[in-house]
Structures are given as structure tokens and as C-alpha cells.
Amino acid sequence: MRLRLLLPLAVVALGACAAVDIKRPLSGEQLANVHRVAVVSLLGDTFNGISIDAPPIREQNFTASVAQWGEDAFVESQVASLLQETRRFDVAVLSRAKLSSAQLRADHAQRVWDLAQAQGFDTVVSIWPTLSQNFPFYKAGYGYFEQTLLGVTHRCLYAAYTVEIYQVSTQRRLAWEWGGAEPCRQDSAQALTYRGSFDPYTDVENCRCSWAWNRVSPRPWPTR
């Protein structure tokens, strides 16, 4: 179980994100106020297993902790590295003081703003487990998804999240964007089958899992 799930990370260019709920880049004035950027992943350690069979609709699911994969640390390092390549900002991973992602998300992420302010950041780039209403059978975060319709089965590993940019002083969201057009690419994990729990998957199957997801990542950030 040591193999990590490779999430389809976005190239988070601050000047090419969707501001508030309007698809447009950050303004020049907003960018001028960005100097020290903290990166924090709030995805957490929960792996979701989902199987949908229709018609009629029958759903099975399980959850499992994959803390050993270190997904948040992996995501943070990747996003920080991508932002550092712009050479426009001072970028670092937010020191979370041993707080879990669930603890950081609580109370409207108040601990994130407190930590960012204490560490001298003016802007936070955060990765949130988020689900669009267009994909009701998924769960926010990441995991395995299987759907059978009229006897035809499609399987994939998925990630449902947003990248969001906040101003620390006001806790105002300046920009956000989905992690991709949809949570997964169909048939990216056809070698796997739904097992009802995480435990039955063998090390070989976890290798296939990691390999299959690597085939579909990273996806580029939508830019203009």
C-alpha cells in the first residue's frame, strides 16, 4: 500500500484562474498585491470506492484511509514547484502544525488563515475536495469509480477537487477553478474491479492502479 495515487494536478498560474464565479483571470491590481504565497492541500487521506449499476440504479461504496500515501504532502510539493517556476512570487508550503486536513477545513478553514497570517503569507493557494452537481455519483476527493450501464462497465481512478486562491487579510476568495473537465477519464483503470472494500486489493493491483492513473496525469490547467 506504499504506492501513492497520482492526482491529476493542475498547473496553477495565478494570472489564469477563474475569479470568484466568473471565468476570467485575476486583475492586474490583484496580482500586484500577491507577494508571499502559501500552498495547502485539504484533500485528506480518505480513498473512496464507488460502484454504480443501472438500470435500476444500485450503488455500493466504501471508504478507506490511505494516510501512508501522503497525498496532501505530494500535492503541496507539486503545486509549490509549479508556482515557483513562474518566478513571480515567494512560494512555500503552509506549515500545518500537525493539523489534519479535516481540522484545517473546519470552521470555514479558519485555522488556515490563522496559520498563513502567522507565517507571513498574503495569499493562499488551496486544493479542496469538491464535487460538481454534474457528477452526482462521485464523492468529493479521490478514489476508484466503476459504472455499469446495460451490461457495459467503465472503470477509472478519479479526483474531484478545486484549486482556490484566497487573500489572507480578508479571507476572500479571489479565484478558483475545477481540477479538470470531469473527475476521471473513462477506462483509465479497466484492469481493476470493485471489491467492496480496500483490503482485498493486492500489491500487484495497487501497482496497476498507480500506473493507470499516471497515464492520465497531469492534466494542464485551463488557460487562455
Image (spheres, rainbow, N blue to C red):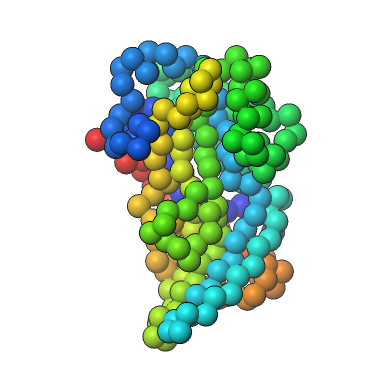
Classify 95 as above or below 132: above
Q: Give the number of callouts.
A: 0
Q: Residue at x 53, y 17 (%)?
A: 169
24 sits left or right of 114 in the view = left
Classify 68 as above or below 34: below
Classify 56 as above or below 32: below
Residue in the foreground of this view, choosing between 211 and 68: 68
Does residue 11 appear anywhere in the picture?
Answer: no
Residue 67 location (% of width, % of height): 70, 50
Quarter occupied by the N terminus: bottom right
Classify 11 as above or below 154: above
Does residue 178 appear anywhere in the picture?
Answer: yes
Residue 102 location (% of width, % of height): 67, 43
3 sits left or right of 168 in the view = right
Residue in the foreground of this view, choosing between 224 and 189: 224
Q: Residue at x 63, y 76 (%)?
A: 195
Residue 170 location (% of width, % of height): 51, 20
Q: Residue at x 69, y 39 (%)?
A: 103
Residue in the foreground of this view, choosing between 27 and 36: 27
The quarter of the picture where residue 220 lies is top left
Q: Residue at x 62, y 39 (%)?
A: 105
Q: Residue furthest right?
A: 98
Quarter occupied by the C terminus: top left
Residue 210 location (% of width, % of height): 55, 58
